[in-house]
Image (cartoon, rainbow, N blue to C red):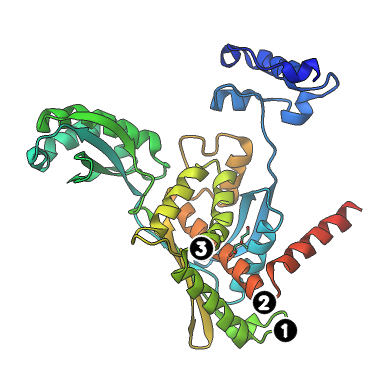
Amino acid sequence: MSDRAEKSLPDDFRKLSLEARRAALKSAYCEEDVDLGAVLGEDASAADRMVESAVGFLPVPFGIAAGFLIDGRSYDIPLAVEEPSVIAAASFAALLVRGSGGFATWATEPIMSAQVFLEGVLPGRELGIEAREGEIRAEVDLALASMRRRGGGYRGLEVSRNEETGLVRVDLRIDVRDAMGANILDGAAERAAGLLEDICGGRRLMCVLTNGAVERRAGARFEIPVRRLARGGYSGEEASRRIESASRAAESDPTRAVTHNKGVMNGISSLALATGNDTRALEAGAHYWAAREGRYRSLSSYRRVGDALEGRIELPLALGTVGGSVARLPATALALRMLRDPDGPGLARIAAALGLAQNFAALFALVTEGIQAGHMRLHARKREAEA
Ligand code: MEV
């Protein structure tokens, strides 16, 4: 084994300057002639401001699924993703749906819950919490001054006791407007915890948002005349029937639903990454919603309605357009500008349409020519381009 393989980073790595961290990385893991600037980006100062122990950036392909028609407006949607077929599939569906009237979307108010978990609360003492809601609200408002100026703020509370753990949970419902909201919610929960302890005599175990985000949802639908679905030797009628059958498979079989939903999130997570949003929070919320009835189901469904195939989707979408890492980098700021700087619910509506498009394109390919044929065509096109 060579000397280099034995090396690793110094214990105080995280405390070093960015330059020193890059030098330590190079000495431990790279050959002499490696140009770290070319590998991890020349200027890593923005990464250094965003995360601990940063050494640079990972370049992820940034592309555009152009030509979406959503609620009568045209959108070119930026996507950051490594999978070759995602942007091609979204663009294909966008074109087909555009020619059939486009996507109609909706979104709820951006209300999320900050949770305070309390232990050691004597049975029944939690019932006193609701009676003192005014005081709790005043306390939470102190942590929400700027959010209130932007039209958001406290929207109510819910108290519950978990019989299994004995823990009391207080959900503080907060309208986070255009923020993803994690920091705001965590801060509000921490602010309220002391008063909640005083009221019911328990002790806080933890204060944090729930990524369930079930109140902050968006949805989309489209209709495509079945005659437009002829493909791969299948008539439009037959392709439509097969898509509906694939939809029913995902609605009733969790092992299929998880892959069906992965297709939905191919689009949504890529848009989230392109705009600097938290992809893990979105994935967690989507899968929680899919399993909300105790059985994991698909996020979307397809049905024949008259002469058309109708597609529908609904899911929690905690997407922000300000704060956190959103638009912190030039590319993520550009991504939001391309979408005409939407507000939080506006971005969620675009994401819902995109998720449905991505999912529809996958199903359409799967039940007609097969997914591999499409992928192979893409690879062939890339190889031609590279030749
Ligand atoms: C691949 O990234 C996504 C699909 O597996 C989705 C699906 O099966 O519906 C094609």
Q: Is residue 225 visible?
A: no
Q: Nearer the viewer, residue 13 or 76?
A: 13
Q: Residue at x 66, y 57 (%)?
A: 86
Residue in view at x 55 percent, y 27 percent: 50
Looking at marks 1 and 3 on the same chain, the residue that comes earlier in the sequence is marked by 1
Q: Does label 1 point to a residue whose CB lies under 8 Å from ligand 1?
A: no
The residue carrying pointer 3 sits among few (fewer than 14), some (14 to 19) or many (20 or more) residues within 10 Å by Cα, namely: few
Q: Residue 368 carries which label?
A: 2
Label 1: state its secondary structure: loop
In primary-sequence order, the first of circles 2 and 1 is 1
Helix, strand or loop status at disc 3: helix
Residue 143, position in %: x, y?
28, 30
| Residue lying at 12% horizontally and 28% vertically, measured from the top left | 198
Closer to the N terminus: mark 2 or mark 3?
Answer: 3
- Residue at figure coordinates x 37%, y 49% from the top left: 212
Marks 2 & 1, CB-CB < 8 Å contact: yes
Between the residue at mark 2 and the residue at mark 1, the CA separation in whole angstroms equals 8 Å
- In three-dimensional space, the C-alpha distance between marks 2 and 3, rounded to whole angstroms, equals 21 Å
The amino acid type, in three-letter code, at marker 3 is Thr
**Relative image position of residue 144 (x, y in whole percent):** 29, 34
* Image label count: 3
Q: In this view, does 316 lie above or below 42?
A: below
Task: Describe residue 151's horizontal placement relative to residue 24 as left or right.
Answer: left
Q: Which residue lies furthest to the right in this view?
A: 387
Q: Name the residue under label 1.
A: 233
Q: Nearer the viewer, mark 1 or mark 3?
A: 3
